[in-house]
Image (cartoon, rainbow, N blue to C red):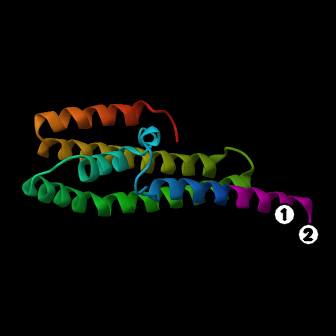
Amino acid sequence: MNGAFWRNLAITVILAGLAAYVGARLGEHPAKPAEAQRAKLLLRDNVYQMVHQDMTLTDEQRRKIDDIEARYAHRRNELRVQIGSANAELGEALANEMALGTAASRALEHLQQAMGDLQRTTILYTLEVRAVLTPPQQQVLDQKVFESLTAGPF
């Protein structure tokens, strides 16, 4: 087997590992992170933890938020699958072209679209949950959302 085969294989393995890491980060749901790590949670996880673990909700609030969660769960999972698929498409394109050619550019566009859709869906979820909360609860949530969005990358 020639050197190009091994190089392409190594690149594919590395990109597959990167795709797995990103997928794991998007799919993880930490049970109870330390206070210092809370700002680093994904926005959706931060909102979920905040309302389900850190706030005292009425039964009606809990029911409404559970309904919101159920409506968005399926869409989020679809988008995570799209992100994983786009990552795999990008990895394969880069392994085949070894450049940011047509196939890699197209795969990158698919990845960006899916990630943007996931962020948009998360924001809509957050706003719907916020509408169920009391004004003091909204202030607390608003601060957490701000911290989550300004905490920087993973």
> Residue 94 or 41: which is nearer the viewer?
41
Q: On the image, which quarter does residue 2 sit in?
A: bottom right
Q: Give the alpha-carbon distance from disc 2 to disc 1, as whole Å.
A: 7 Å
**How many residues crowd mark 2 within 10 Å: few (<14), some (14–19), many (20+)?**
few
Magenta highlight on residue 154: no
Quadrant that contains the N terminus:
bottom right
What percent of the width, then of the height, locates residue 10? 78, 59
Lateral position of residue 138 relative to residue 147, left or right: left
Q: Are marks 2 and 1 in contact (CB under 8 Å)?
A: yes
Identity of the residue drawn at 28% across and 52% down = 53
Q: Which mark is residue 110?
A: none
Identity of the residue drawn at 27% across and 47% down = 54
Label 2 sits on what residue type?
Met
What percent of the width, then of the height, locates residue 58? 10, 52
Identity of the residue drawn at 33% across and 44% down = 120
Lateral position of residue 38 relative to residue 15, left or right: left
Q: Is residue 135 visible?
A: yes
- What count of labels does the image hold? 2
Q: Please, what secondary structure does the residue beneath circle 2 have?
A: loop
Q: Is residue 76 above or below residue 134?
A: below
Label 1 sits on what residue type?
Phe
Magenta highlight on residue 10: yes
Label 1, on which residue? Answer: 5
Identity of the residue drawn at 45% across and 33% down = 151
**How many residues crowd mark 1 within 10 Å: few (<14), some (14–19), many (20+)?**
few
Label 2, on which residue? Answer: 1
**Magenta region:** 1-14
Q: Please, what secondary structure does the residue beneath circle 1 have?
A: helix
